[in-house]
Image (cartoon, rainbow, N blue to C red):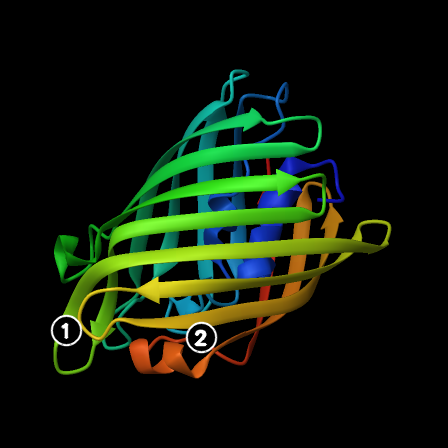
């Protein structure tokens, strides 16, 4: 991507995909302070075109350690409300990753993350795991492939259903002025299990970096299939904004 700050690249994932995975995005640059973190406010916690905060704002934070070898680990927290009929609770996650350079232009990262909702009334039924592989070319292209064996979703008159899910994404950014960038991204998601279906999500937006802060505004949408698959949480046709402070 077109800024040298890897932390900002991770922040941009929020607008690339309509995803709050920004908190756990690309690890900081090699040679930087090994300890770091962030605090952010997002207008809606959206991941893979699906809201995890019932269309409400969410507060997010993370704390991580990155070794010079490329090994990293961290924890994160976010307010969340997966079921609109429940109260707002918290999502906790822990991740471990390994980053490496393929050549002078390409970088890659493999990551495993566990998500838990310890204070939800349904307990561990929302918990799930995810593994992801990222590749970045230069400072403008980001490719990602994610797999979860048990991604949860709410099915009316059925309840919580957990099934395999895969999601490849492609994201780009282009500089407009100093510190200002145009962004675009799209992803394809396949949700397995009962009522298996595929859908597409995408976004267009702008981002502004004023270190240590990052600001993002994007318009995101999903295909009609997402509404059929996630009737109470598909995040289509909406503006998303975020402010992230990194330390």
Crowding at mark 2 (Cα within 10 Å: few <14, some 14-19, many 20+): many
Residue shown at the point (30%, 51%) measured from the top left = 148
Crowding at mark 1 (Cα within 10 Å: few <14, some 14-19, many 20+): few
Task: Tell which of 239 and 107 is nearer to you.
Answer: 107
Horizontal side, residue 162 vs residue 148: left or right: left
Quickly name the residue at label 1. 159
Q: Quarter of the image containing the C terminus? A: top right
Q: Quarter of the image containing the N terminus? A: top right
Quickly name the residue at label 2. 235
* Numbered-mark total: 2
- The answer to whether residue 86 is seen in the rendering is no
| x then y, percent, for residue 207 | 71, 57
Horizontal side, residue 67 vs residue 117: left or right: right
Q: Which mark is residue 144?
A: none
In the rendered structure, which disc, 1 or 2, sits on the residue that comes first in sequence? 1
How many angstroms separate mark 1 from mark 2 (CA)?
19 Å
- The answer to whether residue 145 is seen in the rendering is yes
Residue shown at the point (31%, 52%) measured from the top left = 91
Task: Tell which of 209 and 14 is nearer to you.
Answer: 14
Q: Secondary structure at mark 2?
A: loop
Q: Secondary structure at mark 1?
A: strand
Horizontal side, residue 245 vs residue 62: left or right: right
Residue shown at the point (56%, 64%) measured from the top left = 186
Whether residue 238 is situated above or below residue 50 in the rendered picture: below
Horizontal side, residue 20 vs residue 88: left or right: right
Whether residue 244 is situated above or below residue 240 in the rendered picture: above
Task: Tell which of 82 and 86 is nearer to you.
Answer: 82
| x then y, percent, for residue 72 | 45, 26
């Amino acid at each position: 991507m077109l800024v040298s700050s890897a932390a900002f690249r991770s922040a941009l994932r929020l607008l690339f995909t309509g995803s709050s995975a920004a908190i756990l995005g690309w690890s900081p640059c090699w040679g930087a302070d090994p300890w770091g973190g962030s605090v952010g406010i997002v207008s809606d916690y959206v991941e893979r075109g699906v809201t995890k905060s019932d269309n409400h704002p969410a507060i997010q934070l993370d704390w991580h350690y990155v070794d010079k070898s490329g090994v990293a680990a961290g924890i994160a927290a976010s307010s969340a409300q997966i079921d609109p009929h429940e109260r707002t609770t918290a999502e906790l996650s822990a991740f471990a990753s390994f980053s490496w350079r393929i050549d002078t232009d390409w970088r890659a990262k493999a990551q495993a993350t566990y998500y838990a909702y310890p204070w939800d009334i349904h307990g561990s039924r929302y918990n799930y795991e995810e593994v992801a592989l990222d590749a970045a070319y230069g400072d403008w292209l980001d490719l990602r492939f994610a797999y979860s064996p048990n991604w949860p979703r709410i099915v009316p008159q059925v309840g919580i259903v957990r099934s395999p899910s895969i999601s490849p994404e492609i994201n780009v950014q282009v500089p407009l002025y100093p510190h200002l960038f145009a962004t675009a991204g799209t992803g394809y998601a396949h949700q397995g299990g009962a009522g298996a279906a595929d859908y597409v999500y995408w976004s267009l937006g702008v981002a502004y970096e004023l270190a240590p802060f990052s600001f993002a505004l994007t318009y995101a949408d999903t295909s009609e299939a997402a509404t059929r698959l996630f009737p109470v949480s598909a995040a289509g046709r909406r503006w998303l904004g975020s402010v992230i402070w990194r330390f």
